[in-house]
Amino acid sequence: MPYRTIAKWVVVAGASIIGVSSMLAHRSYPIDMLHHQDDSKLYTVQNHQTTFQSEPSQVLPSQSTGIVAAELTSSGNKNYIEQSATDSPWQKWTNWLPWKKQEVHFGPRSYVEVGGESIGIRLQSDGVLVIGFQDYGSRKSPARFTDLEIGDVIQSINGHPVHSTQDLTSQLIRPMFDIKLGIIHQKKSKTIHIHPYLDNHQRPHLGIFVRDKASGVGTLTYYNPAEHRLGALGHTITDVDTGQPIEGRGLVFAARITGIVKGQIGHPGQKRGEFSSHSHPIGKIDQNNGYGVFGECQPNGAIGPLLPVAYPNEVHTGEATLWTVLEGNKIEKFKVEVEKVSAWQTMQTKSLVLHVVDPRLLQATGGIVQGMSGSPLTQDGKLIGAVTHVFVSDPTRGYGVLATWMMHADGEDLQSKLTG
């Protein structure tokens, strides 16, 4: 189905100054950057730092004896990890010894449609994110004299909800000498007061840079047809300036790749892409966590082949296949090697170490590049995970996350929101 192209995305960033005007405000890098957008202007910036971050590892419940079931909820599809101990009478007295036998059994397997296609993501934060301070000549920013910090999220002003920069600026049109902001600071609600600077027209200025949107192109990892859920990227989306995860919701659009910047040592490459359509979303994003972005999707037809999701202990070193798009919207498959698999009993965002060995992919990209985040990995006829990071010192190598952990993180976050 043809789409009308209305926007091209390279690496851009935008911000609003709350006042009058608008302006910019072994090591691994995540390989996808969402491009930050202002409603009126786009600004080119250099990718100086990691723009995505991982969450701490989580340990699945386990015991030395008996049976433990840790539910890996995948949007309604439940996988059960049962760990049991087969102990002889004498072993009951020596459970601490290393030869104790343990058996692992898995329950119903999940099946998903493998992705690989490029998608456009537009994420709207819940509130506006503070990304900097602005001084007015010799006059310091009024916000500097408060407890407001870079990375805080403003959710209200003088009791009025703030969902966008427009909501904030619309309240700053008349003289005020005390402004009350409701903010989220380190995941805790807080109220602060700012005495604004009044210009010659008696308009108040807080002296802060804020941002409320992020847009860009990434890669779809899977679509779960049983629950109409999608998973993509394999890592969290964070703000390019503050490094803070963007809390919010968004839309998913069809996208296409228009070019490749080849990666080199010290300089990660990137895909250049564009939204195929900005008026016809194909899905909604409702989760953004350390294991990817997740949401609802209602595709017109099948996205990719239906494959089982590999259990963590089924993933092994050796040959695997990477699915991604290098030109247009054609999904291609490339050979990679899984060089290391982390302990499968523990949830980890950096679950795999990958090495690109396919001559075609090396010739085209130099290895792993930005925009490849979320590219699915298959092995032995199963979906095992997604590409997430590139090593700056060696663009042919990088990290991947297990697909099981992605599905678990989606189900866990969704359930917490439904019951919270």
Image (spheres, rainbow, N blue to C red):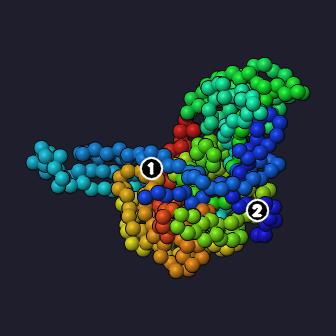
Residue in the picture at 46% in, 53% down: 349
Is residue 174 something one can see in this rendering? no
- Residue shown at 83% from the left, 36% from the top: 20
Q: Foreground residue, 120 or 166?
A: 166
Residue 94, x across and y down, in percent:
13, 46
Where does residue 290 sit, x and y in percent of width and height? 52, 49
Is the C terminus in the top left, top right, bottom left or bottom right quadrant?
top right
Q: Pick whichever, 204 or 110, lies toward us.
A: 204
Local packing at callout 1 (Cα closer than 10 Å; few below 14, some 14-19, many 20+) is many
Task: Report, in whole angstroms, how far the alpha carbon at label 2 lies from the one at label 1.
Answer: 38 Å
Query: Between residues 149 and 162, which one lies in front from this camera angle?
Result: 149
- For the residue pair 408 and 201, the one nearer the viewer reads as 201
**Percent of width and height locating residue 138:** 75, 30
Q: Which amino acid lies under the numbered mark 1 shown in the image of this protein?
A: Leu
Mark nearer the N terminus (2 vs 1)? 2
> Residue 177, position in %: x, y?
78, 19
- Name the residue carrying label 2: 8
Q: Quadrant of residue 168?
A: top right
